[in-house]
Image: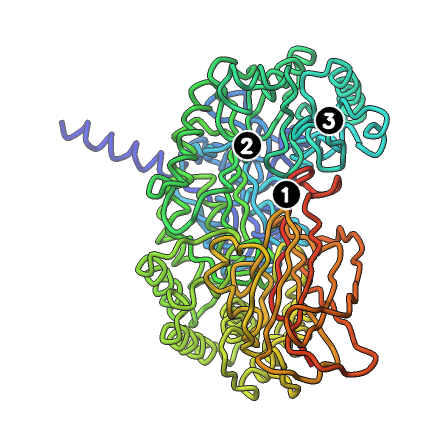
Amino acid sequence: MRKLLIALIALSFSFGAFASVNPVRKGKPNARIICDTTATRSGAMMLQDFIGRISGVRIPILSDNTKPGKNDIVFRRSSDPAIREDGFRLSTRPGYLLIESNRGNGDVYGAITLLEDYLGCNYWGEHEFSVPTLSEISFPDIERTDNPAFRYRQSQNYALATDSVYRLWRRLEEPRDEFAGSYWVHTFDRLLPSAVYGKEHPEYYAFFNGQRHPGKASQWCLTNDDLFEIVAARIDSIFKANPGKTMISVSQNDGNHTNCTCPSCKAIDDHEGALSGSVIHFLNKLADRFPDKQFSTLAYLYTMHPPKHVRPRPNVNIMLCDIDCYREVPLPDNASGRDFLNALEGWSAISDNIFVWDYGINFDGTSTPFPNFHIIQPNIRTFRDNNVKMHFSQIAGFRGGDMSELRTFLVSKLMWNPDADIDSLTNTFVNGYYGAAGPYISQYLKLMEGALLGSRIPLWIYDSPVTHKNGMLNPILRRTYNRLFDEAENAVSADSALLARVQRSRLSLQYSELEIERTEPKKDVARLSAMLDTFETRSRRFGLTTVNERNNSPIDYCTLYRERYLPKTNRNLAADAKVTFSEPVPAPYDKIARTALTDGLFGGATYKDSWIGWEGIDASITLDLGEEKSVSSIEADFLHQLGAWILQPLSVTYYISTDGQNFSGGWKTELPDDSDPKVKFVNVRHDLRTPEKARFIRVDIEGTKQCPHWHYGVGNPCWFFLDEITIL
């Protein structure tokens, strides 16, 4: 027995000697990196580079005809089905370090895992990384196989376009990696341009409201055989022009309520009990025509729910989007999320080729706090558990966006392993990225999360800080947040790089304060001016490029803020005037209609605060100034926000009267068609040649009423929104 024990101990020491790999000893190379194919060279170069950064030692890379020796690092391709796409196996059992991969970037991700998990490296943001300084590099006994939960993982961050190492480290992909010719979502008009076919063949386009609607944002008539053949030929040419690519998106244009309701399309959708029915029938025909290709299509807005009878072909990829869900709680915990889950479960019952597009972004305020960190993991687990194979986590990845770097770090980690410890991941990032400021940033994040949940105010992807001014952004909490950021800045004041990270992350709070302050009747002009100066200066310094998805720049925002929201010296003669309307103001805007137009508070970039609007009609507004006054100019303020189907009116006409019965003037301003996606405030002003006496002012507004052919609400009613009316 004693001899057996001694033998086992000796054997364990023997394996231990082979299991430990020491590529760098006493500041000198003690190994070689050996690649068996050129396909694995990227991982070898990554490992070589970072070992050099850590130790100052350059380990040579040799070709695969070199026999491995002890302490060597070997990259090898494997056909083992246990190693899936982008996955890898690490092993020190041969006496050297073996990194095996199958398809994709497994060799690179294996190298990164070694650097991150065993050598303490990390990559935080754009050219922002941490490496230790070591003269000895040793890997312990390793035997692990690691595969991603999703075969395709996509997110957003400004660094993805500027730092190739960052993209690899975060293990993220982009549509150009997968989709032929970058045909990725909303491709109908790219595949069948309305500029080419719309005029001669309106029958190719959706029929609803009694007519065809050809246009750049139009949907197709999916039962038109001629259209199918044109599209099939186009797709064939795209694949031939992109050898090696096997997937393409054939998907509806952006927009809602624009599907074809011709008798043929409607019959299919009625039979299937869902507007996705005609889409899947069309995609199945393409899938049968090209059985060796993958066809991705959107299940988005009106097509979110699956059909009852038809099943997508195995090579039809369903890209399911949860755009209509609120984000304050995980998907199962509110009605909007449960509706999406019903759709997800329905699709997963008929397809194992599902791509989920999840939204963790505020499109109307990319620089607005969006405390959804607590729902990221449960939602990703839900996707994984429902047969999802591909995942796009869309976040505010702009430079200076709300916690852009942390968001990308977390979603990339969780898309690889949904069961990772998110608290540990968050602490690792916050303390690694912000240094001594980390504890204060952690307090800020936790406090805001609790405040959101306690407020019971939904978190929406088209939100405004003003929505939360009495909730997670109330005055007491904002003072606390600022105190935490002050302490964070003080903690790293001697380190310019860390201080810049803290100040850049503070921009979203500063933007929110400006947005909330503009809605207050009484303003501290000196304080607001100082806040604007700080926000503008830091936006320039840190390269903040936009404050919303429509690319309105922060510099323009500050300029407009000074002109629009700071108190003016000229008193508005219409202040607190009595207002009457020719048309009822629809809910919920009716609650503020009597005061919003004359309260001196100008609306912001989202229609949810201060604006009142009408859909699909004209309207007339009359102001009673209370007494006759000398009027020299009349001005009305309109919102242009295409994303919310808000278009400026076709014309605005002003009238004046002394008795409210007999009106003169008729000064008309016609407004041109405007397809610019930027959010704008359209001021329609008329200056009288000479001042005239008037007590009543009437504003007649001719609405655009219907979304034009270029808009993604084509053929549907559109809104006009009005805020302040100014009389001088």
Relative depth, front residue between 65 and 576:
576
Say which label, 3 or 1, has the lower sequence index: 3
Q: Is residue 665 left or right of residue 489?
A: right
Residues under labels 1 and 2: Cα distance?
17 Å
Q: Quadrant of residue 451?
A: bottom left
Q: Which residue is mark 3?
A: 205
CA gap, disc 2 and disc 3 = 17 Å
Q: Identify residue for label 1.
A: 717
* Residues packed near mark 1 inside 10 Å, few (<14), some (14 to 19) or many (20 plus): some
Identify residue for label 2. 302
Does residue 610 sit above or below 421 in this rendering? below
* Above or below, 523 relative to 155: below
Circle 2: residue type: Tyr
Taking 80 as reference, is 224 left or right?
right
**x%, y% of residue 707?**
69, 43
Q: Label 3 amino acid? A: Tyr
In the depicted view, which residue is nearer to us: 21 or 674? 674
Work out whether residue 135 can be spotted: no
Q: Secondary structure at mark 3?
A: loop
Do the residues under discs 3 and 1 have CB atoms within 8 angstroms? no
- The circle drawn on residue 135 is none
